[in-house]
Image (cartoon, rainbow, N blue to C red):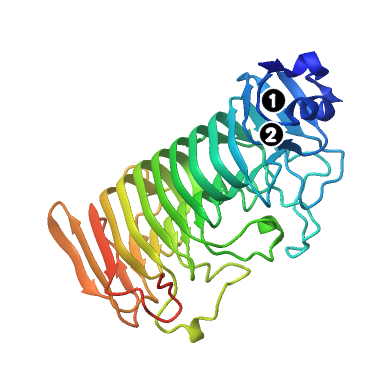
Amino acid sequence: MLDVRKFGAVGDGGSDDFSAIQSVLDGGEKEIYIPAGNYRITQTLKVDSYTTIKADENARLFVCGETDHGPHDFLLTNRDWDFGNTEIHIQGGIWDGNKTGRTNFKDPDLFNMNACTGTCLNFRNIRGLKLTDLTVANSVVYFIRMCMLEGFEIRNIGFQSDVIENNQDGLHFNGWVKNGIVENIRALTKGEPNDDLIALNADDAMNRLENNGMACGPIENIIFRNLYAEDCHTVIRMLSVSSPIRNIRFENVVAGCRCFAINMDAARYCRTPLFDDGKFPGGVGCIENIVIDGFKTWWSTPGERKALFDCESIVKNFSIHNFERDAEQDQAPEVPTLIISKTPNLQIKATQESATVLDAQSGTDPIVLSEPFNDLFLTTATTDTSGACTK
């Protein structure tokens, strides 16, 4: 194991430790150790294939706040975005985006593709990514951003931040992601993430600066277990317009939210909508074979909201079991539990303690369920409709 201190890293918080750590990372096929300390990183650390990084739990690596950052700058990313990397493992440490740094900010021009994305840890085109026992802190925008992954493991990740800002997704997945397991994801700061705890964005606006370098495409075959946030913006987002989100299982989710427990509104109300509703009267999206087993949630702030669960996408075989709306912690009990709209011909059945509270087929008018439910099943007879994926 190669100790970065023996190659010149200081870890005093003032020295520039980028060159020393990058010199150890170069070449791959290495196991690297980062002892406790504070490591100021002035450029993006790039990791090659067959590299394992093991960091002490008190090793803090942070983005320098006095150097300029461009669109491909992060605290850390894999090196080969085009041809891909294999078997990158990162364990331990505090990975800090240093949001309060003078040069660490999101450009006010949302479409400035020469600006920094604001992502802390970035991974694109990797087979065999493993992230374990990390604390990711103070990200400008997304804490961890990923696309084009196959065969990945993400376990024991915590998010914390001294400053709460917009677009701070926890785990943000874009397209071409499949065959993974995600366990024990926890927001350590009340109010975080200030966007989606888990974002499955098979489609998104790739002309926005925070999505620069990502891709649209399928998201398939992932298990999520043990998710927790006391007070996040949204717990789970599934964003599909024409790319599928398939074969996803969630187990044991406990989270308070300020906006949605589950958001499937197809980004209709974002600053950059992805389509014109008038061109897709049959709806959009392909979200199928989704199971959520064990979901305890509540509104963590009072005020008017649409519903805990917003479904405005075409879904097939979508089921929730053991859903609990926590009445003791709910600060907006008057807000409906479920709203369904813009999804014609959707079969809906919801039960509470074996009694049916909703059994209907959607049409042109929204369907609203104010009562809580324990189990829910949604399906459309076919996903072969205008705007939906058919493959």
SS for tag 1? Answer: strand
Q: Position of residue 127 (x, y in %)?
A: 55, 43
Mark 2 and mark 1 residues within 8 Å of each other at the beta carbon: yes
Which residue is found at the position 43% from the left and 65% from the top?
A: 306
Which residue is found at the position 25% from the left and 61% from the top?
A: 377
> Number of marks in the image?
2
Q: Nearer the viewer, residue 294 or 83?
A: 83
Is residue 358 toward the left or the right of residue 115 in the image? Answer: left
Q: Position of residue 90 (x, y in %)?
A: 60, 30
Q: Is residue 302 shown to the viewer in this render?
A: no
Q: Is residue 374 shown to the viewer in this render?
A: yes
Q: Position of residue 375 (x, y in %)?
A: 23, 54
Is residue 334 toward the left or the right of residue 208 in the image? Answer: left
User: Residue 352 shows which numbered tag?
Assistant: none
The vertical placement of 274 against 251, above or below, is below
Q: Which quadrant of the figure contains the C terminus?
A: bottom left
Q: Amino acid at mark 1?
A: Arg
Q: Which quadrant of the figure contains the N terminus?
A: top right
Which residue is found at the position 48% from the left and 60% from the top?
A: 218
Q: Nearer the viewer, residue 25 or 45?
A: 25
Is residue 315 toward the left or the right of residue 176 in the image? Answer: left
User: Residue 96 shows which numbered tag?
Assistant: 2
Q: CA distance from mark 2 to mark 1?
A: 7 Å
SS for tag 2? Answer: strand
Q: Residues within 10 Å of mark 1 (few under 14, many from 20)?
A: many
Residue that mark 1 sits on: 60
Q: Residues within 10 Å of mark 2 (few under 14, many from 20)?
A: many
Which residue is found at the position 36% from the left and 77% from the top?
A: 384
Q: Quadrant of residue 227?
A: top left
Q: Amino acid at mark 2?
A: Asp
User: What is the residue that sits farthest to the left in this orientation?
Assistant: 354
